[in-house]
Image (spheres, helix red, strand yellow):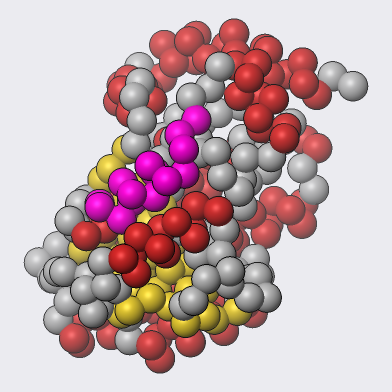
Amino acid sequence: MQLEGRKVVLTGGGGGLGQLVAQGLQDIGADLHVVDRVDALPFDAKFLKADLGDERGIADASAAVVALKPDVLINLAGVQYFGPFERQAAAQIASGYMVNLIAPVLLSRAVIPGMRERGHGQIVNIGSVFGSIGFAHFVTYSSAKSGLRTFSEALRRELNGTDIAVTYIAPRAVRAGLSTPEIMRYAAVTKMNMDPPQATAARIVQAIAKRRKDVFIGFPESFFVRVNGVLPRLVDTALAPNDRKAATLFES
């Protein structure tokens, strides 16, 4: 399915990576509609303000998205907590799972009937390499993205035989909006690879246009995803030195 002239709904399009993905989609002619909690977009696009961090916001967004009759739904909106799990507030945990997992699931459920009726569609879930390799100090983010990965896989199997594609894209760390000063210090201490957002956005748009199934961005991280699936204890050993280094950032 070509994206030129197609109605595309993008959540999280007001963020650093989201803006670049939005631009890439518009460059290839998509009829773009952005869902975000910001008050206004810094670029020209049809806009729906919604907070995907609570049930009411998700319900309102779902109703609005269904009315748009999108050809493509892209679940990109995300939040990230970095730090010791026991220090993360309960409300922040709940909101994080809402944005990172529950919202994509409920938005996907909302658009599927219309896509079936129209005989075509695509659901795109933007996950993370952290969803296949659970990283210390990113416990809730990793687990939410892991759920999103499995949801995408199961939904694709359920929709087999229809013309509704399910695409799961897992970037590695990106130097964009979620990369706080604390995460940048973590990256320096652990020598974590971080991609420029422009390159990641281009890969995301390309994968959507080609209706790819699973895309893992970045090497050697994409290799470790495969290793972790077979030999997770080996990955435990490989990550342990960096986990100890990272823990020193929270000693005060």
* Type of secondary structure dominating the magenta stretch: helix
In depth, the one of 6 and 107 nearer the eye is 6
Any part of residue 226 in sight = yes
Residue ranking furthest to the right:
252
Q: Is residue 73 left or right of residue 57?
A: left
Give x and y (percent) for residue 114.
Answer: 28, 85
Q: Write down the quadrant of residue 146 in the picture.
A: top left
Any part of residue 36 in sight = no
Residue ranking furthest to the bottom:
67
The magenta segment is 194-207
Q: Residue at x 53, y 22 (%)?
A: 192
Q: Residue at x 31, y 46 (%)?
A: 203
Q: Residue at x 40, y 91 (%)?
A: 67
Give x and y (percent) for residue 153.
Answer: 28, 51
Q: Is residue 50 above or below residue 134?
A: below
Q: Write down the quadrant of residue 6 in the picture.
A: bottom left
Give x and y (percent) for residue 5.
Answer: 23, 79
- The quadrant in which the N terminus is found is bottom left
Q: Is residue 252 left or right of residue 102?
A: right
